[in-house]
Image: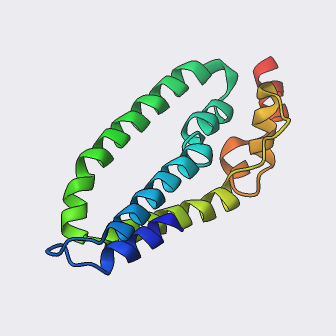
Amino acid sequence: MCCVLAGRHLGEHNAAETMPRDYAVGVLVLMCLYTFSFGMSWGPLKWVVPSEMYPVEIRSAAQALTVSIALCLSFAQTQVFVSLLCAMKYAIFLFYAGWVLAMTAFVAAFLPETKGVPLEAMRSVWARHWYWRRFVGDAKQEVQVNCM
């Protein structure tokens, strides 16, 4: 919502003219609100989801790899943002708003609820999910195979 409103405010003014102070303050407030909202909602997901989805045996190594990739992608996104802002103008905010909508749909459809589930039982949560059970397999069957 903040991205769409900021894009609208920026789109109403040509880059050649000076933006009125009220609009500039409005855009700044929207960007601060967006940053705060992201930090309270989407931001922590890149730390929480990987820590819950990997088996206990490989969790620390997988988390290290996940964090490394996430930080590299954040660096790349930061480096590309100014170029995209110059090329897309105000539409860059609509671009990011579209990604937020797409990822909201992804999370709603593909990430199971893990509230109150201990880390050791996380495999069974993924094994019961309508989509991920094809890839995870049955934890009980794996234990029986390993015992033989």
In the picture, residue 141 is in which quadrant?
top right
61 vs 112, left or right, is left
Q: Position of residue 131 (x, y in %)?
A: 70, 56
Q: Is residue 112 above or below residue 11?
A: above
Q: Position of residue 66 (x, y in %)?
A: 48, 32
Is residue 27 left or right of 44 when viewed as pictured?
left
Q: Position of residue 122 (x, y in %)?
A: 77, 34
Q: Nearer the viewer, residue 101 or 63?
A: 101
- On screen, residue 119 versus residue 9, left or right, reads right
Determine whether 40 is above or below 148 in the image.
below
For residue 122, above or below residue 133 = above
The colour scheme used to paint the residues is rainbow
Q: Quadrant of the C terminus?
A: top right
Farthest residue in the front direction? 21
Viewport quadrant of the N terminus: bottom right
Which corner quadrant of the image does residue 123 belong to?
A: top right
Residue drawn at point x = 37 percent, y = 41 percent = 74
Left or right: where 79 falls relative to 97: left
